[in-house]
Image (cartoon, grey):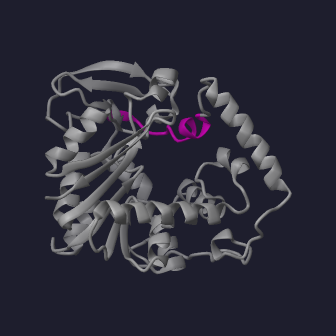
Amino acid sequence: PQDYAAGKVEIAVLGNESPMLGNSPWLRPRDFVVLARRLWLKLNRSYGLAGDITDNLKDMQFAFDEYPACESCGSTDVREVLVAADGNRVVECEHCGLWFTSPRVSEDVWKGWLLQDSERNREFTENRLKYGDPLARNIPLSFSFWWRITRWRNQRHARELLRMHGGRVRHIHDVGCGVGFFLKACQEMGLSVSGNDLNGYAVKRMRELFGFDVLIGELPDFLEQKDGSCEFDIVHMNDFIEHTYHPLRDLKCAHQMLSPGGLVYIRTFFVDSRKFEQLGDKWDMLMWNHVYHFSEKSLTRLIEQAGFGVKEIRRHEDTGIIEVFGIKP
């Protein structure tokens, strides 16, 4: 693996036609084909057809030999609730009801894979920067003007976070910040931004393209870098909490980072949704790289365990997505 911390990774600059530079055309002929594909896919999903799991299967190259205790209560008493389409085994804690993957890839192996300068990590990152999506299977669904849509959605989302916070917001931290789309939108709104991510190659790309204050590592690493003294207004966890091996620990870190009255935002899928009822173990959200599978009850309990009060919950039944806004007292 190349040395990211020392800044020794060579970075290729995006081409002049990159959508993120804002100089791509609004509409190209291929966009009409993309629209037709999207409509066909939406029609298929409305009839309950499962998603493509090709990419999930491609990355199942590790030993599944770690049997974790429940993150919420520490119990090791579990029962199997389902086996997903890729063979991922999901269990339920018999004491508190939290669902999680067991066995799973060991934490050290998984971190090492994310940090390395692998062809797969480069592919995911470059696909995101060029097409707005890491998965090759979704490239045919990418409009040529995807960046304009993404920017508009992220800024609309950021304005909603500011409204939910209700006070003066100066600094937003994004946990698992991907390639920085949300941070870029917030920065353009005049906010101070920072983030952290385990994908070392993606972090180098963010630093090169946007100059962000982004750390390669987990939330405790970020706190340690700041000597535990930081006062943020919003901590953002979009599509993150299902991936981390320590969701309660990371929520407690977020609590420590926030000023009184600060807002934590969590977005993930939830298993007591209509989408799960429709697809069951065929749902592609239940794949192996999602190690926690929350219900509304188990997620809000974890957020409250970390010291937050739950301000608002938004359930999106058709997509199986839940949003929770928590406030630090």
Q: Is residue 57 magenta?
A: yes
Q: In this view, does 5 lie above or below 258?
A: below
Q: Is residue 58 magenta?
A: yes
Q: Nearer the viewer, residue 118 or 178?
A: 178
Q: Magenta residues?
A: 53-65
Q: Is residue 180 above or below residue 329?
A: below
Please tell me which residue is depicted at 71% across the width and 42% down the height of the picture.
38
Q: Is residue 233 left or right of residue 259?
A: right
Q: In this view, does 22 lie above or below 56?
A: below
Residue 288 coordinates in the image, percent (x, y): 43, 35
Count of all numbered marks drawn on residues in the image: 0
Tell me, yes or no, if residue 66 can be seen here. Answer: yes
Tell me, yes or no, if residue 215 can be seen here. Answer: no
Please tell me which residue is depicted at 18% across the width and 28% down the height of the picture.
96
Residue 142 coordinates in the image, percent (x, y): 69, 53
Q: Nearer the viewer, residue 263 or 246?
A: 263
Say which quarter of the image contains residue 220.
bottom left
Q: Is residue 222 above or below residue 322?
A: below
